[in-house]
Image (cartoon, grey):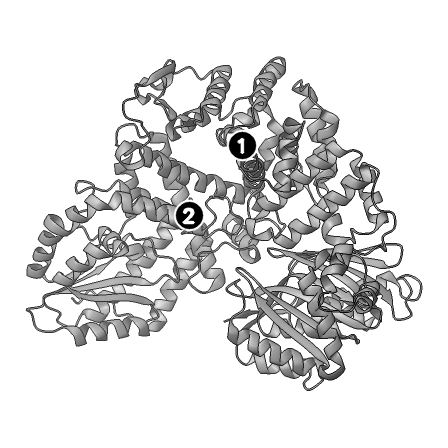
Amino acid sequence: MNNIQIYTPETVAIKREEIKSDHRKGSDGRDTSIGLTNLADSCIHTVITDLNLEGVVIAAVGGYGRCQLSPYSDLDLITIYDENAESNETKVSDMVRSLWDLGWSLSHTYLTLDEVKSKADTDLNFFSSLLDLRVIHSDDKFGDRLNRTLSADILPTGLENLINAKLEETTRRHERFGSTSRVLEPNIKESAGGLRDIHSLIWINMNMKLLIPFEDNTVYSRVDSYLNLISEKENWHPGLTKRLIDANDLILKIRHEIHYLRKEKNDFLTFDIRDDVAKNLIMNKNGENVSSFLRNYYRSVRNISRALQLSEELLGGTVLKLSRTNIEAKMLQPGIYSDGSRLYVDATLGEKVDYNLTNIIELFRYSKENNYRLSSLLLYQIDKHYLDFELSSKDRKKIGKLFFDIFDDPANLAQTLRQLFETGILKIIIPELDDMYCHAPKSRYHYYTTDEHTMRALEVIEKLDSSEGIGELQEVLRDLENKNELMLALLFHDIAKPRETTEGEHVAAGAEDARRILKNLGYGGNIDLIERLISNHLVMEQTAFRRDISLLETIELFCLKIKDVETLNCLYLLTYADLYAVNPTVWSEWKRSLLSNLYRNALDYLNGYFKKDIKIENANLVNDLRKKHSEEKVKSTLAMLPISYQHEFDSRQISDHISDAENLKTEIVSVKCRSYFNFSEVTIIAGDRKYLMSDICAVFAVNNVSIFEAKIYTRTDGIAIDSFHVVSLKERKPLSPETIKELNNDLVKILKNEIEIKDLFERHKRRWKWTYKSALEIPIRIEFDESKDFSIIDITGSDMFGLLHSITRALSKCNVVIYSAKISTKEDGLIDSFYVLDNLKKKIGININEEDVKNSIINEAKSSLFRATAQV
């Protein structure tokens, strides 16, 4: 008792700083966790010294029980008490209060033994936490009783149902976090390949023999201990255990560093801290940079994912039904078998299996043709065997022919290419692809690593090809003559992205790489088409989303690059797959409509019958509108707007615009909001004036509303028609009724000049917690172009809160008038294009200098009121 150190908030803080210092000097992740665990245990022993607790067991569970604390982790504590003993509730409350006073955050549960049994039967997460139970304080008599109950009743019963429940839970969790270990902003605990997957691997392999004894309350890396025990199971590959232990330690170190940088409990490795995390953890290592550090992280989480898959397979057919009953295993090659649904290796034969490259590619071809998958152990063995293999130049064309033969039938092609990539076989055939492996692009447009994005793009086309839909994209794909060229173009389209130093640089370099590689491998197909597709793989997106595609000059310029109908068909499909694989949430009906309209206009042009008279209105549209409005009103309204307006709004919307514009004679402003499944549409019609657009964007910003698409038009009579697709900033969901009401009130007050933006900002600022950022995290890119009648300002780069307000305010300051605009946000990236003239209706460059406009935008963005991020 006398040896127990007395802790105060000051001494705890000093100890924490010592642990942080050791972490920054390069200590292992497990050592930091053990240091924090020992400190927490000591604090508990300090505060309970004089409490005379009887009939209770105080235990650490969860991460605290596993000795995997991070700097700002909660202490997961459970106090189990004897219901027949004298009440200890007041004493336990004193303990909890004292620990809070010492600076610890707690998650504490106070239960009787019967309540523990009942909760373990109904709550999977609670039962799982009991598997990590580590006793900190125990009444001897009651502790023995608890141990007997756990060992004889609670744990054996729960373990019987744990496997299936945990596998189902893991699947649901992966779906919530992207269903892959290669997301660019992972939750390093919950995402696929994260810490929780290691815990799941342990839990599904748990049995009473593996369980650490109740009386063992020592502090050590219990995860490492469990992984070593699991490695003794039959068919488990021992080399995988070391990879798992190393991966676990690396992720722990990253988690610790995130906590230290954030100064809070947080498990997301986000763009804003990613480089700092990497730099702080590699500062004592020679030869490692941020890029190699991130690749090491993604390799580590891949090893965890693969180990979990292997463990699931080893549990047998009753869990995952991998083997089909009544089907006799068929030997394909010595040691490699098919059981009717997968190919697997007989682990007992070890190195006797022939891993000749020709044989391996034949296995992949066989699995593709029969829709079989390769077992995790077989994939691991192939990966291990070809870790440092290099293909000789004399064998390159021979292996290349085998590789291209896989493309002959498109069925299961994407799945096969993914497995070839995962095992390293693809980079043996095409070494240049190795740079793509686990590459984390700096662009916030992407949600996945470059290799994962590429594989998903291939899968998008494969899914489209196998679907039974009759949409335009399906029809184009089914009639396509060059499917092999399309798939190869997708495989290579981002091959040069890891070498990119400026945005878009990878396009030309990737096209050159593809031509050289395909030629060296002896590809006999249309290499010119593949090169043309890669060279232009951003052109269709940029044209559709930034330009007025109803103009003949836009279509002519686009088709000049595309050349022919077959290239157009391939590029349409490639653009769709590329966009969809960035992140499915980026794809929208508006983007689909723009791409489709561009495709149809270009197809008409290439076939020689694109309408030269772009002033011809859509006759069907006019007829629809005449049901509510006079023909004169309809035609005069459409004449005041560009033809693209008719493409971007349907007849119902245009009819509403006409009516609302008429009402401006009495209402001054019209604000309408409609909510759909995953977004809200806000339409504002008002008389145009200086700063109108920037004021509207400011109102959205102060109400924590994020704009992800916008269609901006100004009629020649000075009436602005602005339509915005928006979501709530934090939840990324349609706006709530309360937000819509407040947004509407603020918009009306601003547009009626009843309140100023700075006053609105101050009123909302008091309601939220704001974090100030002093400079643009990633510079925006500003480019100038022109059409026949307008100057075009293209702005791309990293999005930030309130940036659209800053851009439009800067344009107004320079006396630049916006006549139409296309606003699009992909994740945290923006693609904004403005069709503008100066206030004298002249193009930029005559009265107003381009450089002045550019500097105005950058300076306004840096000094804006909205250089902040709202945190509810």
| Residue carrying label 1 | 414
Whole-Å distance between the Cαs marked 1 and 2? Answer: 21 Å
Q: Looking at the rendering, which quadrant does residue 53 occupy? A: bottom left
* Numbered badge on residue 142: none
Label 1 vs 2, first from the N-terminus = 2
Q: Looking at the rendering, which quadrant does residue 122 occupy? A: bottom left
Residue type for callout 1: Ala
* Left or right of residue 351, residue 761 in this image: right
> In this view of the protein, can residue 862 be seen by the observer?
no
* Left or right of residue 806, residue 379 in this image: left
Residue type for callout 2: His
Q: Secondary structure at mark 2?
A: helix
Position in image of residue 221 (x %, y %): 30, 48
Which residue is situated farthest in the bottom direction here? 754
Tag 1–tag 2 contact (CB < 8 Å): no
> 524 or 29, which lies in front?
524
Position in image of residue 254 (x %, y %): 45, 51
Position in image of residue 721 (x %, y %): 73, 69
* Left or right of residue 570, residue 330 in this image: left
> In this view of the protein, can residue 98 be seen by the observer?
yes
> 305 or 21, which lies in front?
305
Image quadrant where one finds the N terminus: bottom left
Q: Is residue 830 above or below residue 99?
A: above
> 270 or 220, which lies in front?
270
Position in image of residue 826 (x %, y %): 62, 54
Q: Residue at x 49, y 30 (%)?
A: 419
* Numbered badge on residue 174: 2
Q: Residues within 10 Å of mark 1 (few under 14, many from 20)?
A: many
Q: Residues within 10 Å of mark 2 (few under 14, many from 20)?
A: some
Q: How many marks?
A: 2
